[in-house]
Amino acid sequence: MDPALIAERLGLGRPLRPVETLKVDELQPVWKVETESGHWVVKTIRPAGDFWYGVAAQAGAFEAAAWRAGIDMPEPYLPETDAVGLWVQVDELLYAKAARLLEGAHAVPPLEGPLAEWAGGTVAALERLGIEADPAVDTYETLQLQSDWDLWLGEGRELGVLDAAQARALKDAAVRIAEIVRPALESKPTDLVMHRDFSYLNILVTPEGPRLLDFDSAGAKVPWWELVAVAFELAGPDLGVMRPERRTVEACLAGYAAAGGRLGAADESAFTGMLLGRLSSTAWELWISCGHRGVNAATQAKYAPIVRESVVALTELLDAAPTWATWLKA
């Protein structure tokens, strides 16, 4: 669909100049649009299923609440018409949303002290919104059954995606993660809606200060687990591959505590969110590399080395977690 027409149907007004493409992919293209109402970033999506509507509505309410609370972020376009969260239907099964265009540069990891402190404080500010996640539309990452892992790993070996040693390493990682996270899940506090994609790629450093981008993945998370995941992501992306910078973790933690964030257990259970997320993404990579989800042979081949790299990263993450937990002690 014509991006100019999308902008008009969204309610931004008539484009004054040709629309500029910022990002193109099959799921969510992104454009830069200048209209009568200002400069905007516009993105579109085609819902992947009925589940999307509840998730998008919850994330949109969270984004709007964050803006009204003064979180450092781009101004979202708040639709005056019926919408799914902040998404407006602009065509059959096509939805669009917008936010004010900001100029700046993405943060570079590992983050320096003041920027890491800002990040921790922003996590605490989002926590203070106190929006409880709706379990009917969004549940926290689940722990897969060991019997399921046996089935998936057997298929991975049969197809040559994993060799025997790699399959054993992944099974061992799944068992170790279950031992850490099961007690934490059984006793965890109420999930709040949190950002869930708070990475250096979603921090834009502008002349007015840092701004947090892209609230589309917002959903259920324990705030303390979110803080820990954010701190280590900003200290060294590709955990298990890149060594995180301890000073960044400690600065992020200090900013969180100073802003009133609720500290949690400073042990391996603090990594529950990270571990579940990594294990779930590895499972998805394994499924894709085995030809599930309707992928083609080229996509299977692409993901085979990715899942092998994830096995190494998971093992190294688990081995490092006891040491990293000591960094969380105030």
Image (cartoon, rainbow, N blue to C red):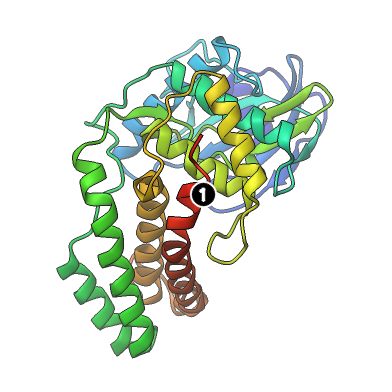
| Residue displayed at 51% across by 10% down | 80
Q: Which residue is mark 1?
A: 27
Picture layout, residue 271 above or below residue 64: below
Q: Position of residue 32 (x, y in %)?
A: 73, 34
Left of 164 or right of it: where is 41?
right
Three-letter amino acid code at the position of disc 1: Leu
Q: Quadrant of residue 147?
A: bottom left
Picture layout, residue 40 above or below residue 31: above
Residue 212 seen in the current view: no
Left of 249 or right of it: where is 134?
left
Q: Position of residue 194 (x, y in %)?
A: 44, 30
Q: Quadrant of the N terminus?
A: top right
Front residue of 151/221: it is 221
Q: Identify the residue at the far left of this view.
A: 147
| Residue displayed at 73% across by 31% down | 114
At numbered mark 1, what does the secondary structure look like: helix, strand or loop?
loop
| Residue displayed at 59% across by 43% down | 249
Picture layout, residue 105 above or below residue 149: above
Left of 48 or right of it: where is 77?
right
